[in-house]
Image (spheres, rainbow, N blue to C red):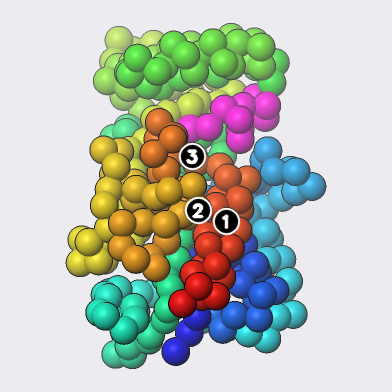
């Protein structure tokens, strides 16, 4: 029986594994190999690693965790998580694994506006976070392809960064193409807007397909409801990273730094629960 099983090998899951390994807790990390930033070539706004390839960040994390023999990492997807009076059970293929605690760090998957050509630019010239990708378009024009009320706020945030900020209703965009200088947005009226990059507002879904069966409480946003230490409504089940939303936040905090912090705090809570048994 494991002290903890971590589901997800992104920054939140890796940080949780590192913290548990340093506390000599028998830990299993299960990584499906699917990542929200899988198309991103450079991760930003992360101290000491600004601009590093996210895949390299994951590799470095695994290398560091390898120094702690109590942590095992498997490349495998989870099909179910359940709880009985004795423990939590995680199903991987035909195998059923038991643990005192489970940390959900599966992340989420984005659904982009249905605009031809947009997906091909996603993670490079098309982004959703001005803190993570805004500076890369400094001194050049950008488009906010977003029909919500938040578009104007996002535009004002980018005004000190970009030379021009264009607010564009997604319904007016027919196609997006890459150019030598950035993007060309073809619109329904036949005009073409050329910009260095664009920001969109994707919707998202949890990668944890087993949440309904586990019975954790969700926020209105669809994220898993947690306390500041990642505890969910199900005893000894924790949620961290993009999947989680504590009550004090207006929504999930989509940030590498926040994911690392969440992974560490959940691991601390797991250790505390083990010594209080």
* Left or right of residue 185, residue 213 in this image: left
* x and y, in percent, of residue 69 in the image: 68, 86
* x and y, in percent, of residue 219 in the image: 29, 42
The residue drawn where x is 49% and y is 47% is: 228
Which residue in the structure is indicated by mark 3?
Answer: 253
The residue drawn where x is 68% and y is 38% is: 45
The region drawn magenta spans 128-137
Q: Which mark is residue 229?
A: 2
* x and y, in percent, of residue 41 in the image: 62, 48
Which residue in the structure is indicated by mark 1?
Answer: 265
Q: Are marks 2 and 3 in contact (CB under 8 Å)?
A: no
Q: Earlier in the sequence, mark 2 or mark 3?
A: 2
* Left or right of residue 192, residue 95 in this image: left
Examine the rendered structure and indicate whether residue 255 appears above or below residue 66. Answer: above
Image quadrant where one finds the N terminus: bottom left
Q: Are marks 2 and 1 in contact (CB under 8 Å)?
A: yes
Nearer to us in this view, 269 or 73:
269
* x and y, in percent, of residue 89 in the image: 32, 81
Closer to the camera: disc 2 or disc 3? 2
Q: Earlier in the sequence, mark 2 or mark 1?
A: 2
**Quick one: SS at disc 2?**
loop
The image quadrant that residue 24 belongs to is bottom right
């Amino acid at each position: 029986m494991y002290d903890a099983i971590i589901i997800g090998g992104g920054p939140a899951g890796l940080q949780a594994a590192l913290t548990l390994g340093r506390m000599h807790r028998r830990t299993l990390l299960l990584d499906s190999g699917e990542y929200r930033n899988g198309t991103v070539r450079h991760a930003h706004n992360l101290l000491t690693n600004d601009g590093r390839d996210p895949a390299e960040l994951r590799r470095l994390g695994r290398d560091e965790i390898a120094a702690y023999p109590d942590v095992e990492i498997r490349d495998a997807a989870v099909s179910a998580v359940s709880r009985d009076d004795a423990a939590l059970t995680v199903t991987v293929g035909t195998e059923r694994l038991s643990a005192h605690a489970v940390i959900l760090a599966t992340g989420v998957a984005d659904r982009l506006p249905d605009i031809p050509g947009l997906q091909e630019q996603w993670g490079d010239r098309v982004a959703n976070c001005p803190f993570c990708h805004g500076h890369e378009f400094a001194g050049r024009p950008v488009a906010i392809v977003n029909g919500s009320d938040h578009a104007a706020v996002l535009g004002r945030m980018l005004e000190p960064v970009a030379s021009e900020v264009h607010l564009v209703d997604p319904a007016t965009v027919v196609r997006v193409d890459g150019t030598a200088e950035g993007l060309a947005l073809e619109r329904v009226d036949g005009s073409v807007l050329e910009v260095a990059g664009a920001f969109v507002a994707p919707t998202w879904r949890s990668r944890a397909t087993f949440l309904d069966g586990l019975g954790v409480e969700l926020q209105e946003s669809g994220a898993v409801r947690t306390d500041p230490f990642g505890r969910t409504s199900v005893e000894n089940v924790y949620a961290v990273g993009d999947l989680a939303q504590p009550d004090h936040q207006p929504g999930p905090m989509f940030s590498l730094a926040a994911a690392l912090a969440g992974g560490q705090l959940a691991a601390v809570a797991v250790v505390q629960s083990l010594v209080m048994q």
